[in-house]
Amino acid sequence: MSGENSPLPCPTTTHRLTEELMECGRDFHRRGWSLGTSSNYSAVLGREPLTLLMTGSGFDKGRLQPDQFVVVNEQAQAVQAGSPKPSAEALLHTVLARHGAGAVLHTHSVAATVLSEHFLKDGGLRIAGYEMLKGLTGITTHEAEAWIEIFPNTQNIASLAEVIAERLKDIAQPLRHGFLMAGHGLYTWGADLAAARRQVEVLEFLFEVVTQKRLLFGSF
Amino acid sequence: MSGENSPLPCPTTTHRLTEELMECGRDFHRRGWSLGTSSNYSAVLGREPLTLLMTGSGFDKGRLQPDQFVVVNEQAQAVQAGSPKPSAEALLHTVLARHGAGAVLHTHSVAATVLSEHFLKDGGLRIAGYEMLKGLTGITTHEAEAWIEIFPNTQNIASLAEVIAERLKDIAQPLRHGFLMAGHGLYTWGADLAAARRQVEVLEFLFEVVTQKRLLFGSF
Amino acid sequence: MSGENSPLPCPTTTHRLTEELMECGRDFHRRGWSLGTSSNYSAVLGREPLTLLMTGSGFDKGRLQPDQFVVVNEQAQAVQAGSPKPSAEALLHTVLARHGAGAVLHTHSVAATVLSEHFLKDGGLRIAGYEMLKGLTGITTHEAEAWIEIFPNTQNIASLAEVIAERLKDIAQPLRHGFLMAGHGLYTWGADLAAARRQVEVLEFLFEVVTQKRLLFGSF
Amino acid sequence: MSGENSPLPCPTTTHRLTEELMECGRDFHRRGWSLGTSSNYSAVLGREPLTLLMTGSGFDKGRLQPDQFVVVNEQAQAVQAGSPKPSAEALLHTVLARHGAGAVLHTHSVAATVLSEHFLKDGGLRIAGYEMLKGLTGITTHEAEAWIEIFPNTQNIASLAEVIAERLKDIAQPLRHGFLMAGHGLYTWGADLAAARRQVEVLEFLFEVVTQKRLLFGSF
């Protein structure tokens, strides 16, 4: 298991990222964004070859333990025997990591679930004009808009992973910031885990803003 | 008190489950699902004969202490003198445990209270199409639906326990996932305490989704 | 200061109640029921003569310190020189304590503020049919109703205290459970601090239920 | 760096205020008022010349570290080499500090974002008749009103700082309590950090009250 194609990652880095992902899980679970063993999180351990530290399938995100993580390779397969099973959605993480993400976070909030179900017919959700948009990587003024694309939910993750890989490479209108799966939740990413957490917080905040605006004033 | 029909449960197991139920109470109380001494929780200690560790009646679930639990037998009676009084609803726990549940959790959330009062006329609440449904035991795709049956609230728990026992054995359409008592709250269960907590989190999340969808778009 | 009419209270009791009131403040502040130095809490230290341990005026309830409490007599005056100033509302606490309350809690939640402002015209808020009502002292079935009386807000606390004292003695329809001051908040009480906390949690839960029911279904 | 015009602040005071601002950040982040590296906070260290301790730009407010603060002078420039970069909005803090504020807190809540966007057309938000208003500096009765002025959002902070400086000096109707930037968030201040935190809590509570009143009863 320690050959050229799947070297063991640095124990110090693995330990630090495990601690950070556990803390991230406690916070997201407390906020109701990762209830009932939903969600999965990952962070890149190395790139030559690509390895990711990822939450195993089916664990309570509010009380993650070190032995509930799995190291996966570019094909989203566990590189060490005896690891927990990777999530069925691990392929989405590896696609995003290959594209450059240093960490990928997938969450299930009430607002993301309801908005993504409703706006699937439009293919996405446009959010514009808020200062908080500046928290998204690459946005430097509130006079901006984010288009959060929405994909139909599916249990065929391999197929969705191919669609996402294509959309990431779309030169005309590349997938940015994150995406929603309808009635399911949010995927977002960043250069590192802190950046990915910032993306989650900003997008969840904006989903709440859109929701509250509609409730108060009847429009989006 | 240590005869063949009511052996004392293993102290280690009792201690571990007491700790876990205390932690569960702190979390549910913080989330507003177990306020004002409402709710009761149990976990199976042994099956030959059936014994359950259960919260005593009338304690603050956010600050449970080890001496606020009671061990009950299949008839929902305390097996040790000097124990706290079992909850009036203990019979519902033993009915569910006899049917195979390893842990039973009963909670009182705002969403469950309001939805169960309103949908009593329909006999239940149908929730379909959400990824989070996969968190319920036995569901493996979002293309599923959960029918959460609603019973009229009653102070005659013995009578309701008989109804529930019958419904659990209904071959055509067995009671699954959990049930609501109108204007009262949720009962759900799992193979063990972690599974039952997952059921609570998933169902409470889905009650919030149903509520938010109605508020935003006027339909369920 | 240690004469027959104002004996110093037992240090152990004072210490324990101080700790419990500090913990109560942390929880209520976290929940948003005691923000911005609003709210005041008290617990009876002795009855011959009546002395109460009470939060001083103007302190952050989320971070109460032992030196931010004051012991007051039946006239709501500090019994020890150098104490913090009692709240302007201390007279309401002593009226309730004279009537038998062992602890009095006053909170300012969003739901209580909005509902009390709106229903002042009706003189109160009727809440009926919910299991959670059983958490209120003296209620043993969900087939009950609580009438939470609403008084106009005032800065003349002495005058309101007289009104409350009369209403508590009203034989035909005595003031029970608690009362609201319009656009201001809730007063409730119990035999001891745990009972008063339970009253707060139950009433705040029910205010949320009433609010959510109206938002979802357009009626109270 | 320790000449007459920029003396190093007292280490004890700096340490204490750093701890307090870190704690403030943890609480505001938990409440959702400072998500995604939004917000900035400051406290005055000295007045001859004016120096402020301020959060550096772009840090997670829920997990602030001592090395993520910067000491700035009256021109909002770092007084020590190697400090984190001051926020682009530091000039608003120094304008308010020059006017007498001992601490300035800027937060981004959902309610402030949505209300400020909607009421920009009216130039402000009027809040009247609530007991909680008494938590604002200078208000002593609920029979009061607060006018919270709303400014268009801008990335030209220098220009907005001039507008604010003028409005603070307006004899007829001076800027009081705080102000909103449309679609952005709240600025408020106090004689010290505790007073500024109280202002944030009171104003955020009142924004929630206004929101809830509108949702329930259709009017503000």
Image (cartoon, coloured by chain):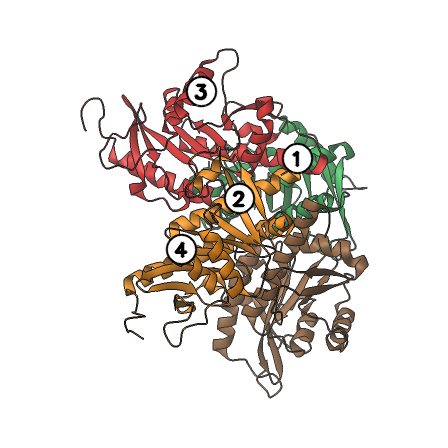
Chain colours: A orange, B brown, C green, D red
Total number of numbered discs in the rendering = 4
Q: Which residue carries the number 2 mark?
A: A147
Q: Which residue carries the number 3 mark?
A: D164
Q: Residues within 10 Å of mark 3 (few under 14, many from 20)?
A: some
Q: Are marks 1 and 3 on the same chain?
A: no
Secondary structure, mark 3, is: helix
Q: Are marks 1 and 4 on the same chain?
A: yes
Seen in the picture, residue B216 relative to D112 is either above or below; the reply is below
Q: Nearer the viewer, residue B145 or D195?
A: B145
Residue B183 seen in the current view? no
Q: Chain of mark 1?
A: A
Q: Chain of mark 2?
A: A
Seen in the picture, residue C198 relative to D209 is either above or below; the reply is below
Q: Quote the CA–CA distance across marks 1 and 3.
A: 29 Å
- The amino acid sitting under disc 4 is His
Q: Earlier in the sequence, mark 1 or mark 4?
A: 4
Secondary structure, mark 4, is: loop
Task: Return the mark for residue C141.
Answer: none
Q: Which residue carries the number 4 mark?
A: A99
Q: Chain of mark 3?
A: D
- Residue C199 x %, y %: 64, 49
Q: Between tags 1 and 4, which lies in front?
A: 4
| Residue drawn 48% across the image and 39% down it | A133
Q: Chain of mark 4?
A: A
| Residue drawn 69% across the image and 75% down it | B95
Q: Quote the CA–CA distance across marks 4 and 2.
A: 19 Å
Q: Residues within 10 Å of mark 1 (few under 14, many from 20)?
A: few
Left or right of residue B8, residue A80 in this image: left
Q: Earlier in the sequence, mark 2 or mark 1?
A: 2
